[in-house]
């Protein structure tokens, strides 16, 4: 079973090479990554190099109870590409970017303020070696950008506009709020 490498580990600085065809070893590594994601409390995704695996350009992520494998992800467009473009969806004009606080399993105990594109288009390969193209926005765009940064050897500490110890009070900003059972009763 794999474990997370220390935050100083050089694997976090390496850019993973594109995979042409999955090897038996890489398929086994993906299986182990999925097991680790399932048992890691609070984790939304894990990239291969966070575990010291440097020959696998892939990450696994949770969507409810389903775990998806993303191989060779490549961002082909972001909402920040053209500053003059106005992007709309059914709810109206969407922002080009959004600063938010992010945590990272490779740098525990801290949150990092990072501005990322609100929407992205991504091309990737699934475990069946079929390429997909998807448009993601908000939290999914942020998650993919974060994990693709890992695969490109870019650490969250390299992009952070501000760093906050998780034991400190939260600064003013946007935070997703989870409803508790007490909130639901009111």
Image: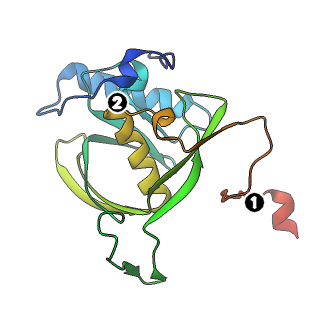
Q: Is residue 151 left or right of residue 156?
A: left
Residue underneath mark 2: 153
Is 160 left or right of 29, judged from the image as shown? Answer: right
Mark on residue 179? 1
Q: Specify whether 92 is left or right of 184.
A: left
The picture places residue 78, in percent across and down from the top left corner, at 32, 61
Q: Position of residue 54 (x, y in %)?
A: 29, 21
Give the quadrant of residue 155: top left
Q: Residue at x 36, y 19 (%)?
A: 11
Locate the C terminus by quadrant: bottom right
Residues at marks 2 and 1, CA–CA distance in whole angstroms: 35 Å
Q: Nearer the viewer, mark 2 or mark 1?
A: 2
**Is residue 25 or residue 52 the one in the foreground?**
52
Q: Residue 54: which disc?
A: none
Q: Residue at x 67, y 56 (%)?
A: 175
- Whether residue 44 is situated above or below residue 96 in the rendered picture: above
| Residue 131 point in image, percent of width and height | 17, 50
- For the residue pair 66 and 73, the one nearer the viewer reads as 73
- In terms of sequence position, does the residue under pointer 2 or pointer 1 come before the other? 2
132 or 49: nearer the viewer = 49
Secondary structure at numbered mark 2: loop
């Amino acid at each position: 079973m794999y474990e997370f490498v220390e935050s100083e580990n050089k694997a976090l600085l390496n850019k993973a090479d594109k995979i042409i065809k999955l090897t038996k070893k890489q398929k086994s590594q993906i299986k182990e990554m999925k097991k680790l994601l399932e048992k890691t409390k609070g984790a939304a995704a894990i990239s291969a190099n966070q575990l010291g695996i440097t020959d696998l350009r892939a990450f696994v992520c949770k969507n409810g109870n389903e775990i998806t494998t993303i191989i060779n992800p490549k961002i082909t467009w972001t909402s920040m590409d053209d500053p003059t473009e106005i992007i709309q969806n059914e709810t109206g004009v969407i922002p080009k970017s959004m600063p938010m606080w992010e945590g990272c399993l490779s740098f525990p105990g801290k949150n990092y303020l990072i501005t990322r594109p609100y929407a992205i288009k991504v091309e990737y390969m699934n475990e069946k070696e079929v390429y997909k193209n998807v448009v993601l926005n908000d939290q999914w765009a942020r998650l993919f950008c974060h994990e693709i940064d890992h695969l490109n050897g870019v650490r969250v500490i390299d992009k952070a506009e501000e760093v906050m110890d998780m034991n400190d009070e939260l600064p003013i900003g946007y935070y997703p709020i989870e409803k508790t059972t007490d909130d639901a009763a009111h």
